[in-house]
Every structure is written in C-alpha cells, then in structure tokens.
Image: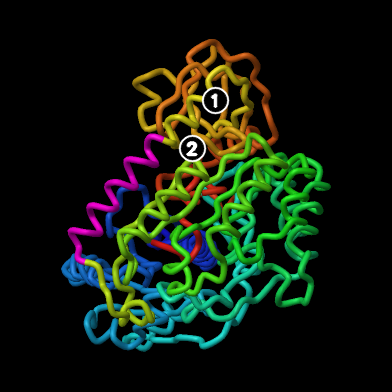
Amino acid sequence: MSAKTYEVRTYGCQMNVHDSERLSGLLEGAGYVRAPDGADGDADVVVFNTCAVRENADNKLYGNLGRLAPMKTKRPGMQIAVGGCLAQKDRDTIVRRAPWVDVVFGTHNIGKLPVLLERARIQEEAQVEIAESLEAFPSTLPTRRESAYAAWVSISVGCNNTCTFCIVPALRGKEKDRRPGDILAEVEALVAEGVSEVTLLGQNVNAYGSDMGDREAFSKLLRACGGIEGLERVRFTSPHPRDFTDDVIAAMAETPNVMPQLHMPLQSGSDTILKAMRRSYRQDRYLGIIDKVRAAIPHAAISTDIIVGFPGETEEDFEETMRVVREARFAQAFTFQYSKRPGTPAAEMEGQIPKEVVQERYMRLSALQEEISWEENKRQVGRTLDVMVAEGEGRKDGATHRLSGRAPDSRLVHFTKPDEEVRPGDVVTVEITYAAPHHLLAEGSTRTVRRTRSGDAWEKRKAARDAKPAGVLLGLPTVGVPAPLPVVTGGCAVE
C-alpha cells in the first residue's frame, strides 16, 4: 500500500512560508509523502496555510475550497485542512461556510495537525482547534526545508506593535523571543547539513530581546552568527524603524557574513499618516537611519514597503512619500494600494480614499521607483560580484543559456553559464555588464567558480530524490532563504 500524499498551499508573508515548512515536516514525520508538483488538489491531504491581511483573503480561500469540494466527493478518504491567520480569526466560520473541511487549526498550534487529521478520520467529523497562546515555538517542530543551501531561522514570533492597518499581532500574539543559544544551535545544525545562508526571521525582527530585557540582543545575535564557521551569508527581515539602533548598524558593518542588505518598511513618508498608522517614528527618523546605514555600509541595497491611499491621505501627504522615495533611493520598493483589513482600526477610519485616486497615486509612485531602481542598478555595472547560484530564480535561464543567483546585497543576477558544472549553492565571481530595473546581467565569461558544501548538499539531495519513486522527497533542509527566495514584504506589513 502506497503512502498517503499531501499538498501545502501557502498564502501571505514569510512567516507563513516558514510555517509551511514545519507543516510539511510534521506530515512527513507522520508518514505522508509530498504530492508531485502540479498535483492541483490531487492529494490525500490538502492543507491551506492562510493569510488574513488582505481584504479579500477569505474570498480567495473559499473559492479554492469550493473547487476542491467535488474532488473530495469523488475521493473517499481525502482530507482538507485550513490553518494560519485566517483560521485563527474566523474559526468556526470556515466549517460553517465549507462543511467539507476536515480540520481547522490556528497559528499557535500548527504542531497538532497530524493528530487533528487522524481524529477527524476516526470520528468522521470536522475538528476545530484554535489555541489562544503559543504551544510550542515553531522551530522546535520537524521541518521539510525547500532549499539545501539557504534557510529561514525564526528568532521570535508575534508582535507588540499596534499598527492600525495590521491585524497580524492580534492573530500571532505578543512577541515571544527564542533563547539565543537555541537560535545559534539551529544555525549551527543547518550549517552542518550544508546550508550556507540563513535569514533571521521575526514579525519585528530587530525588537528581538524585548522579551528578555536586553535592548542589544539583536546586534549580539548578528555578531554571534559571524562566529559560525561555514556560515557565509546572514540576512534578516523585517526590522521596524522604531527599534533600529546604532548597535545594529555597527554589527552589520563589522560582521563580514552579515550581508549589505536592509529591508525596512517605510509605509508612508507623511508624518501625519505615520501618526494615524501608529508607526511610532517620523520621516526625519527614518531618513536618519538610511543615512547612517549608507555611511557605515556604502554598497548596502535598501528596500522598503509602502502603502498608498491610507485613510485620510491627502495629495500633500502622498507628495511627502514621493519626496522620501527620491531622497532614500531604494533599490526596490514593494508598493501596495491600501485595502481594508477587517478587524483593524483603519478599516473604520473616516476619509477612505476613492479607488481611482489610490490607483493614480500608486501608478505615479511605481513609475518613480522603477526609474530609481534602474538608476541604482546601473551603478552596479562594472562591479565584480560573488553570486550564490540559486535554483528557480531565472525563469528564462534555459532559453538564454544562463544561470541565476543572488549578489551579497540580494540583487538578482543572471550570468552566462560557464563550461564547468555549477550547482545551486555554489558561488561564482562575475562582472556586471548590464542593468535592468529588477535584475543585473553578467554577459561575459565567469571569472571563477567555487564549489561549496551547499552545492554538495544540493547534489546529494537531488541524487537521493531521483533515486526514489515519483512523489517521494527527502525531509532535508521555501526571501531569504529558500530557493527561490520569496519576495519579502515586511512581515505583517502590507500583504
């Protein structure tokens, strides 16, 4: 009898991506195997790991559940589970609207999924279990990591902020920090398995230490990561300007394996709107951080999140955002049109902006950032960069005879495929010859190819996977960072 298969569908931020790795690990530990890519619901267990941030998140979920209903009818024994932030928020509503769902679980008890599936099978009724507080730190659970060379490492869960546009703190709870020793032990274990890049992950990552009473805990953690032999690249996401202190900037500049990259959400350049958002910093404070980072790390690539059309935003407020974008010169900005998040204070605010006005402002901001991104990328032409080869980053690599990877500052680089074998996780040295707004090209010959332990790990996993029957994958260690690096959009900020 063949093992039961599973599929996990993930929506939302990088926290959900990391949670889905845990869910996959739990299911494989319970004897399930991952369904082949493209199964599209043709699995014995389909798990939805949901997001509750967007206004239409529930419509998206119920639409997908509706498409699975006839498949479940035709397949006796098939099970459907819904977890994540929307499950935490809506609870019994999900089973009422989609009675064919077998399990509903929340953000605090993802470790219960295999037990709940078995209980639903035996009792032949839906199991709804939502914990009100964290039962086990996610990183203590089994993991099926999507990358052999890059990994998420969660350092905290929850958030103590009260941003008026964000419902995630209400669903993820107050910030809870992991002990530094536990974090470093996980990183060391990952490096021993072949991982060479880690991304420290938290809803508000640089507030790390508030749960322990140590305001410099995050900078100490960065420096400690610098002492781990074999760890080549350290990244983190997403920080909050309120908690971004000089000791963190110093640690970034002085720790060689901490990459020259910073993703720091702006949300708005208007002090009036920042106050309405309860963002606890102002324009001058934000730009001051940018100046300090650039002074300490001249080649740092800085990216951000911006919300356009927050309630009450005037044309003058929007122009302040445009001014900050011109001055900060972000390498990349993830810009979003404001939409109501049910359950947030902003959803009930007066001064909701008409859709057409929000759209027009969004287009202006996007055009400005596109221009700046291209100009900043052009400054990279002629530079020689070490690029970590990635898996799945270049969608046209086969047609163009190129490979793709990430520079130290996380810019995407497409480079000419060298004559010698290059594996994901290996590092190549190339010269940048052309810049586009969202990627760089290295069209000449590759300067050097450095085979790495990460490349060895990728090769070993691929050989083992190819030797298994279809649909069976190893539980070995998805920006960053899984491959490809998921687009980072600032934790709970603006998805």
Of all residues, the one furthest to the front in this rendering is 316
User: 110 or 52, which is in the foreground?
Assistant: 52
Q: Position of residue 347 (x, y in %)?
A: 31, 78
Residue type at mark 1: give it: Gln
Residue under label 1: 380
Q: Residue at x 60, y 59 (%)?
A: 285
Looking at the image, residue 429 lies above or below residue 165? above
Quadrant containing the N terminus is bottom left
Residue 164 showing in the rendered view = yes
Side of 163 where 94 appears, left or right: left
Side of 477 where 45 appears, left or right: left
- The residue stretch that appears in magenta: 354-371
Residue under label 2: 466
Q: Position of residue 261 (x, y in %)?
A: 61, 43
**What is the spatial separation of the Cα atoms under label 2 and label 1, in whole angstroms?**
39 Å
Side of 95 where 427 appears, left or right: right
Q: Residue at x 80, y 64 (%)?
A: 181
Q: Nearer the observer, disc 2 or disc 1?
A: 1
Q: Quadrant of residue 212?
A: bottom right
Magenta segment main secondary structure? helix
Colour pattern: rainbow
Disc number placed over residue 165 in the picture, else none: none
Dot 1: element: loop
